Image: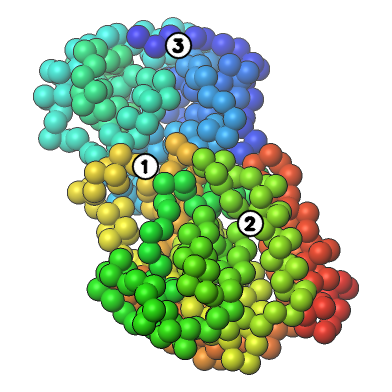
Amino acid sequence: MPTIELVPVSALHPAPYNPREADTERLELVALSLRKLGFLLPLVATKDGEILSGHQRHRMAAAMGASRVPVLHADIQGAKRRGLNILFNRATNDISVQDTEQDMITALHDADVEALAAELPDIPTDSPDFYPCMTAELREVRPLAQRNVHRFVRHAANVGRMLARLGVHLPIVITPDGDVVNGIGRLEAAARKGRHEIAVVTLDERKAALARTMLNLLSMDFRFTGESADCLRYGAFRRSLLHRTCLGTAFIVPVCRPKRLSDVRLDEAFTAQWKSVCGTCVLDFGSGHGDEARMLRGAGITVTEFEPYPAPNNTVSREQGRASAIEFLAAVRSGISFSTIFVSSVLNSVPFPEDRNHILRIVAALCGPDTLVSAAARGIKSSAWAGIQSEAASYRGSRACYFPMKIEQGTTLGDLAVSPKLQKFFEEDEWKALWERHFGMVQTGLAGGMVTARCRKPLFLHPRDLAESLRFEFNLPYPDGKRMGLVRLALDAFSKRLGLSLEDA
């Protein structure tokens, strides 16, 4: 059974990157839960006292005068702490993948919390009853799983499985009859793994009624700012397993719309057709692993690449990102004319609307009178979005931890075991509106669940706005806490290319 220790409140400190934002109403509910139920689950913290789970319970326990809190220590190093911190914000809620933060807020407001709490006496802080998780007992997994199998939720089990892989085994909370109050995913993960026993906290029915609401619905909103926002920016890198073996949609739709991308071969006939439409000097903006650029170069096409987040072995390299940017800016400064600029699946991984607009401004500034911009991104009609929205996901999806976010329509947060990644899936109308802010001629469409855009005639761009976007894009953050640091080089390159001064814009 995992060892839970009582440690001084002062021995713990909040994670500086915690993205949860507390509000007064829900903090009061956290305090109410502690007064009536105590610590049903421990906080989770690193050995050096950094809280991974339980920031608000720690805060309110201190405000209530508690001197100690129960802690399960986890040996989590480096960047994985960020992902685990976010994971914990879903790990203790028995919810499905379709349940959004707003759904939980609505259900919490509909629950008669005050009436449920009024039936229960207050528990004195620092008393043994204040720490029920400290007296968790081991129970057999199999009979508990058999009794609760009808409530198994794949998404919750995915979260439970990931926690177990990280060595974090939280208790589950049950009634005397063995009905799970909280932790159905942790129970399912244990059953599927073949574990024989699991730690349980048992509550009488009166407490169980309040605990169901507090443990499953009470959660704080995500607010990604500062360091948390930067974490999602460099988390946008293309994963090492995702190499392309054929050209992506953005590279194909200007020429044809095949049923399968793999049907397209860069043979002599297709290459001639492709060059007649896309030209022979192109830019791959956000080139990922450079797979498509290599294919095109093999077909005799001149390709300039820009990839700020190269990530060999899923480790973002600032050195390689700077090298890519320097080479790209040298091409910009030379005045090279791009026949086509490709933005292939890039905008799905750019986490914030303002960041996407920075990219589109820069792309527009690189366009000549005849330049074609061809872009594609996954839309809400894609199989990827359908898989995230459905409990009946693919095998790969069923082992991942992706969940929808309310910060923007069509967004998910996941890949927490590698690096937190925010994904945006587009409605066709919003995709079109995004490009129409920057181009006078925009044609959008759908291709195999992807939204596509072909654009020409960039709209007037104020130098001040372009300079702002360059200052953002060429000073992107990196996991080591440093930034790209190429703003001056970027301003100089674009000033030279456009024949205007951006330094003071």
Query: Quadrant where the C terminus lies?
Result: bottom right
Q: Which of 106 and 448 is in front in this view?
A: 448
Q: Which of marks 1 and 3 is in front?
A: 1
Helix, strand or loop at label 1? It is loop
Pointer 3 or 2: first along the chain = 3
In percent of the image, x 24 and y 16: which residue is there? 195
Q: Is residue 204 above or below residue 415?
A: above
Residue type, numbered disc 3:
Ile
Q: Are marks 1 and 3 in contact (CB under 8 Å)?
A: no
Q: Is residue 69 above or below residue 119?
A: above
Q: Do the residues labelled 3 and 2 touch (CB within 8 Å)?
A: no
Which picture quadrant has residue 129? Answer: top left
For the residues labelled 1 and 3, the Cα–Cα distance comes to 26 Å
Q: Is residue 456 above or below residue 80?
A: below
Residue matched to label 3: 4
Residue matched to label 1: 401
Helix, strand or loop at label 3? It is strand
